[in-house]
Amino acid sequence: MAKKLTNEQIEQYNRDGYLMPLDLFSTNEAQDIRDHIEGLETIHNQGVAGNALNQFFRINGQVAIPFMAEIAKTPALLDAVEDILGPDLMVWSCELFIKEAGAEKVVSWHQDLTYWGLGETDDEVTAWIAFSDVSKQAGCMKFIPGSHKQSIAPHSDTFSEDNLLSRGQEVAVDVNEDDAVYDELKPGQMSLHHGRLFHASGPNKSSDRRIGMAIRYVTPDVQQVVGKRDYAMLVRGADRNQNWINIAAPSTLFGEEEMKLYNEILVAQSAALTAGAEQTVNLYAPSNKMAGI
Ligand SMILES: O=C(O)CCC(=O)C(=O)O
């Protein structure tokens, strides 16, 4: 029996590869979370341990920033993801995608699973939660319905400065923009999308920042197949397979143990995340040098 989604919504996800908009947090709760994010930006405007704060926002935030792990454990969110993936859920990465008001930053058409080393699995879902008004004008995500039914298409790396992705990767096949469906979300709403879905987002032409958090959920069946090992946080059910090094949620913001683990994970994951790249993939540098972001 489904916990949050209707049978129609589950069928819709299976058919289209995404679901939106789903209510998750109230407007006030979303504003509190936004305040928290912006508070961290103020306090850590000089970076953390030699890295830009954005490094921690953009990958594995759940390892070093307690509130990101807490959000990933929100029961109503897990109920929706459980309806898609089943009762055993792990978090692989939490990431903030922020576009400043008027910024040219975009995300090119891509399929998430391309560089993660997790194969072509159906057992990965991203929940993307809005903490500002994420309209078409603000550069919301756009999806190509049904594109998750195909395999991972060839991608090329653009390394474009205006691209929020680590290597500016984009699918090297034609995407018909007329087919795109816009993922417009109000603060506190979320969407779910499949790891092989073609998706992208445009510049933020609004007068406010565009703030969203992507949480990558996997089941214990998913395996790292490019790198030697990988790490995930069990958030519901049980991990009977032991494909993952299980990690706990952080207890201290940028604590010593948390930072050690953060670096260890990045080193392990960089094998998959940088595989085949012809230039340095700066975003995923371990935190002993300033990342170029
Ligand atoms: O926030 C965006 O514009 C893109 C996010 C994205 O590509 C993802 O969450 O998979």
Image (cartoon, grey):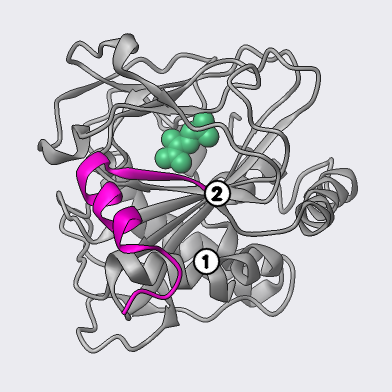
The magenta stretch is: 1-21
Left or right: where 101 falls relative to 153: right
Q: Name the residue under label 2.
A: 190
Quarter of the figure with the N terminus? bottom left
Residue 73 found in image quarter: bottom right
Q: Position of residue 164 (x, y in %)?
A: 52, 27
Left or right: where 169 falls relative to 266: left
What's under tag 2, amino acid-wise? Met
- Badges 1 and 2: C-beta atoms under 8 Å apart? yes
Question: Which residue sits furthest left?
Answer: 151
Can residue 73 be seen in the rendering of this structure? no
Can residue 10 be seen in the rendering of this structure? yes
Please tell me the numbered disc located at residue 77: 1
**Relative depth, front residue between 179 and 36:** 179
What's under tag 1, amino acid-wise? Leu
Q: Is residue 172 above or below residue 27?
A: above
Which of the two labelled residues, at mark 1 and mark 2, occupies the earlier sequence position?
A: 1
Is label 2 within 8 A of ligand 1 (CB to nearest ligand atom)? no
- Residue at position x 25%, y 14% from top? 175
- Residue at position x 29%, y 67% from top? 85
- Residue at position x 14%, y 28% from top? 153
Left or right: where 133 falls relative to 128: right
The tally of labels here is 2
